[in-house]
Image (cartoon, rainbow, N blue to C red):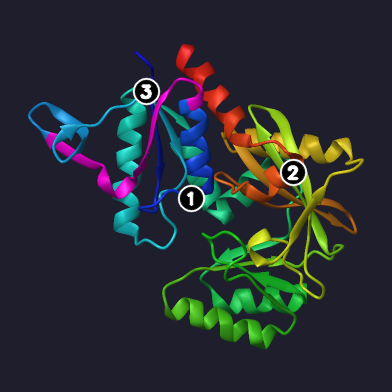
Amino acid sequence: MPNSVVVIGDSPIPDRPSRDLVIYSRNSGLNAMYMPISRISVKVDKDGPLTVIRDRPFKVDGIFLRSLGVLIDVETFFRRAITIKLLEEGGSVVINPLDGLLKTRNKLETTVILKSKGLPVPDTIGTEDIIYAYDMAKSMKDIVIKPLQGSRGYGAVKVSDADIAFQIMRTLLTFKKPIYLQKYIEKPNRDIRVMVIDGDVFGCMIRVAPNGQWKTNVAQGAVGKPCVNIDKTVMEIAIKSVESLGLVYGGVDIGEGKDGYVIFEVNGSPDWAELTAVTGKNPAKALVDSMIKRLKA
């Protein structure tokens, strides 16, 4: 009987990577399907805790965990996290593991971990003290204010005036949001996205921003170009970043600053449509191979 694998995401309808994972899993002989995490419940009774769908026990051999959700409240987050934790503790192989994925969802924690491992990151402040943040914005001069949890460049604002930054930060605090700011790193109008899977570089691309734009996210209009003669150091930084966060795979965004390379972000559930188009290789196949290897272990 084939192993059962479920791709778990936040959306009722699977996104492109989730569809790819289901297709490649089925092509490899696995019994695969997509499941929104909102459909999986936790039940606790005399027999103990378990995961269920409409009171039917839910247990699978492997899980590709794509998302717990971004625009959700803390209570929903807690419920979803314990759901995945129960599945992990029940023996399901989870890629990426819950702990690693949660680290990447918290940009401040990611930055702290990477720096502690000796990896290059921008100077960063995480605070709820607006006076301190204002003083740091003045000293850094050019800063980027970001959501602590987010992706695709949504909500990231580049500011060169500390008083404008003050107004933005005050608004964040009004809505009970923490302040997360980084020193802006001057770089060419591009960065390097490196996809790492199981400790090896699967592929990379140069993401070129639109004219006059500083964001290099594909979702913000950037275009992927093939990597040519990429420094070996970039690959080493990317591999170490993914390993430091306890991930099986990750997309690492690396900039070419005046003082050397710097890591802007590590994505534990990256999109890969542009990378696939640029490299001609779909990461889903390698991820399914990684899952099969773990299921056989």
Q: Which residue is mark 2?
A: 119
The residues tagged by marks 3 and 2 sit, at their Cα atoms, a distance apart of: 35 Å
Q: Please name the residue shown 30% across and 40% down the image.
A: 83
Q: Earlier in the sequence, mark 3 or mark 1?
A: 1
Q: Secondary structure at mark 2?
A: loop
Whole-percent x, y for residue 88 in the image: 37, 29
Q: Nearer the viewer, residue 44 or 229?
A: 229
Q: Tell me whether circle 3 and circle 1 mark residues in contact (CB < 8 Å).
A: no
Amino acid type, callout 1: Asp
Q: Tell me whether circle 2 and circle 1 mark residues in contact (CB < 8 Å).
A: no
Q: Is 42 contained in the magenta span? A: yes
Q: Nearer the viewer, mark 3 or mark 2?
A: 3
Q: Which residue is mark 1?
A: 15
Q: Tell me whether circle 3 and circle 2 mark residues in contact (CB < 8 Å).
A: no
Q: Quadrant of the N terminus?
A: top left
Q: Residues within 10 Å of mark 2 (few under 14, many from 20)?
A: some
Note whether 120 is above or below 175 in the view shown.
above
Lateral position of residue 52 relative to residue 269, left or right? left
Lateral position of residue 50 relative to residue 197, left or right? left
Say if residue 97 shows up in the picture: no
Q: Earlier in the sequence, mark 3 or mark 2?
A: 3
Say if residue 148 shows up in the picture: yes
Amino acid type, callout 3: Asp
Span of residues in magenta: 27-44
Q: Is 132 contained in the magenta span? A: no
Q: Secondary structure at mark 3?
A: loop
Q: Secondary structure at mark 1?
A: loop
